[in-house]
Amino acid sequence: MKSIFIAALLTFSSNAFSQTNEDACIQTAKNITEKLDCIHGLTYKEISSSSAKRVFDIGFTQLVDHTKPELGTFTQRLVLIHRSEDEPMVLQTSGYSIFGISEASITLLFQTNQIQVEHRFFSTSTPAVVDWSKLNIKQSADDFHAITVAFKKIYNQAWVNTGASKGGMTSIYHRRFYPDDLVGTVADVAPLSFTTSDQRYTKFVENVGGDAYKECRENFRKIQTQLLLHRDEFLPLLSGNFTQLGSAKVAFEHSVIEAPFYFWQYGNPDSTFAGCNSLPVNGSPQEMFSFLQSIASISDYTDESISRFQSYYFQAATQLGNPDNSTAHLETLRHFEFTIDQYTPKNVSYTYSNEAMHDVANWVKNDADQIIFIYGEFDPWSAGEFPVSDTGKMVEKYYVPKGNHGSKFTALPSAERQLVSRKIAGWLGKAPIMEGAKALVGVKTLEDMEQEVRQKYKLP
């Protein structure tokens, strides 16, 4: 015990000394690379440079457990887009890995700096020894706080954070524990779930679109029924390793069950080629199977796909929660269970608690301020939308008409889009260089890039 105390004391003293040195170093540094050199525990590689901006791939040293420095560190990947120390900063995350390097809508429209953050326990941002108990929303918020503290020594203008889906959730968790780190948050399509089989999502999928899409929903249920009735015809066609789920039979059943959710999550029901009118309700079993593969491909249920995002499944099974599925019409045809626990790491002990999500919900209702939520009208994850403030503070929600899980503020109707843009301008202290949707026509934003990956792997 004494040795642990001494180690912690030495770590604290070393950190205090290095922070003092960092401040002095940054004050005398002449350019951004010299300033990055001043930050303790940071490595970087410049990957592109132009007269307008410079881009750096960064390794940032983080504590495995922010309450126990003696447990060691890991390297968290960041990507810095630098324009000027005199510009605001956008702190962005997908909530997963860094799927690609690009600029978020806010960054583009306001020409700010940006830091992309890879979430702990994803891809390269994983400790050498994986202790799953260190993967929780508080440790993640501590990571983001440490990044904010370090980089505010260089960028001391306004900071906002943003993210979509799990990235939006992660941005809110950061604000929950460190509300003063940022002046505002834009969270796109961010859900808040309270069980590992949250039935709000079931009700949403069963009623999405109202009477206008009733036939579409009914046709989808008919297709699911036929797929399970003819499953023996399709099983020989399935390829891949399914050790995690137990068998290809389980994987196939899961894909059939989840297909409607994914159809509404990322599809467009009015699409000529992939919408409600193209559902093969009167097609052959083979046509139905081909349709299923376009919505919920069996490859998404292989060991390779599951292991890539197992950190998310662990979070869902312990804190974040998960949707229930609409299966009443399939009960006599189902052979297997379907729980989030089937997707989590094997031989790892854990328990689920909704305490953290209720805490976040209460904070949003009672204490949060300067937060904007964007949701899609047809996105099933909207069933788990965050609450608004009970105290009159600025916590606002906007909805993209017929929007799916790729909804963002630049897709809002013109009047609302301009309103949100003005609010963001107020946070940043500067007007947008370009105006909204028109400025981004033909531009692939970071949100677009991340949506493609989430859609490919059927991620929230």
Image (tube, rainbow, N blue to C red):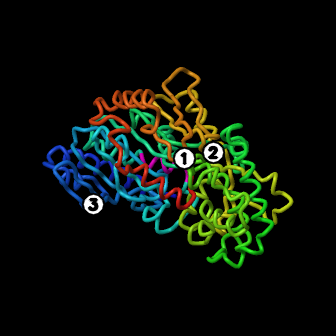
Q: Residues within 10 Å of mark 3 (few under 14, many from 20)?
A: some
Q: Residue furthest top?
A: 392
Residue 182: x %, y % from top left: 39, 36
**Between disc 3 and disc 1, whose residue precedes?**
3
Q: Quadrant for residue 235, please give it.
A: bottom right
Please say whether residue 133 is one of the residues in the magenta stretch.
no
Please name the amino acid that badge 3 sits on.
Tyr
Please name the amino acid that badge 2 sits on.
Pro
Kindly indicate whether the residue at mark 2 contacts the one at mark 3 (C-beta within 8 angstroms). no
C-alpha span from label 2 to label 1: 8 Å
What is the secondary structure assignment of the residue under circle 3?
A: strand
Q: Work out whether residue 377 or residue 305 is closer to the camera in this orientation and state it.
A: 377
Kindly indicate whether the residue at mark 1 contacts the one at mark 2 (C-beta within 8 angstroms). yes
Q: Which region is colored magenta?
A: 136-144
**Between disc 3 and disc 2, whose residue precedes?**
3
In the picture of the structure, the residue carrying the numbered disc 2 is 380
Q: Is residue 240 left or right of residue 21?
A: right
What is the secondary structure assignment of the residue under circle 2?
A: helix
Q: Residue furthest right?
A: 332
Determine whether 259 is above or below 209 in the image.
below
C-alpha span from label 3 to label 1: 33 Å
Which residue is at a point 72% across and 45% down the rendered structure image? 215
In the picture of the structure, the residue carrying the numbered disc 1 is 405
Residue 349: x %, y % from top left: 67, 62
Prevailing SS of the magenta stretch: helix
- Tell us which disc is closer to us: 3 or 1: 1
What is the number of the mark on residue 225?
Answer: none
Q: Work out whether residue 182 or residue 110 is closer to the camera in this orientation and state it.
A: 110
What is the number of the mark on residue 44?
Answer: 3
Number of marks in the image?
Answer: 3
Which residue is at a point 48% across and 48% down the rendered structure image? 167
Determine whether 32 is above or below 243 in the image.
above
